[in-house]
Amino acid sequence: MDFCDVIKARHSVRYFEPTPVDTDLLLQIVKEAQTAPSWVNAQEWRVWIATGKTLEAIREEFIPLLKAEAQSESDLPQAHRGDWSEMAQHNMAAFSQSRIDAGLLEAKLEAQSHLFHAPAVIYLTIPKKHSDWAVLDLGGFEQTLLLSAANRGLGTVPAFNLVRYPEIIRRHMGIDESDALAIGIAIGYEADHPLNHFRSSRQATESIVVIKD
């Protein structure tokens, strides 16, 4: 796929088909993500992939907690909207309202509580003792992974709620306490569902760029 087409094809998929994703395909996507830049080649990222019975066990424990909006115990602090800049809060509010206006709130909550019905979830970790630059590196790794998946016809959605209760994931995946669960990425084949037809807006490029000659 042409690179511009890959960029346009990538979007957050919030409802997946039950079709499993081939293990070799998942590994190839991770391998391509490893080409992302890293401070002095530190490469502190680690990748954990839950599928099949393991993912179903995690999902079974997550569903009642997410439906009840149980208190999060995430390894990285939850980013409450009030802690963001005024611009970010404005954009978040507009995004949330647009989804409500589209009549998708209930569908979003249902899909989210079931981990988006994904056949696989990729968990990305970094050491709990890490530099801020490791988080930046992990973001580059994540985006490269998302684009690789899109290039291969797979949908993805990175979501805080996928790592909201890390002790459950740690227990099922064998993740050491020294590693912080940074983000989860649901991955699979996109279902024909109204949630997947929704697109968020972006600011005008001119409003975020300053060029000085």
Image (cartoon, grey):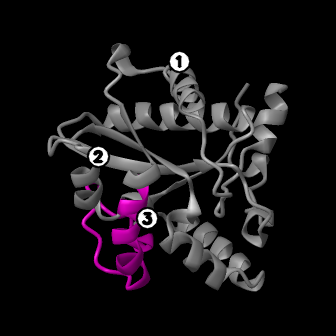
Q: SS of the residue at dot 1?
A: loop
Q: Quadrant of the N terminus?
A: top right
* Distance (Cα) linking label 3 and label 1: 27 Å
Please provide the residue range marked out in magenta. 55-82
* Residue 106 location, quadrant: bottom right
Camera-side residue: 21 or 200?
21
Do labels 1 and 2 touch, CB within 8 Å?
Answer: no
Q: Measuring 55% from the left and 33% from the top, which residue is drawn there? A: 26
Query: Which residue does the numbered mark 3 point to in the structure image?
Result: 161
Q: Amino acid at mark 2?
A: Met
> Which dot, 3 or 2, sits closer to the camera?
2
Camera-side residue: 133 or 171?
171
Query: Which residue does the numbered mark 1 point to in the structure image?
Result: 35
> Is residue 100 left or right of 139 when viewed as pictured?
right
* Marks 1 and 2, the one that precedes in the sequence: 1
Q: Measuring 24% from the left and 66% from the top, which residue is drawn there? A: 73
Q: Position of residue 208 (x, y in %)?
A: 68, 48
* Marks 3 and 2, the one that precedes in the sequence: 3
Q: Measuring 77% from the left and 68% from the top, which residue is drawn there? A: 193
Mark 3: few/some/many CA within 10 Å (<14, 14-19, 20+): some
* Distance (Cα) linking label 3 and label 2: 17 Å
Q: Is residue 57 magenta?
A: yes
In the rendered image of this protein, does residue 73 appear above or below residue 135?
below
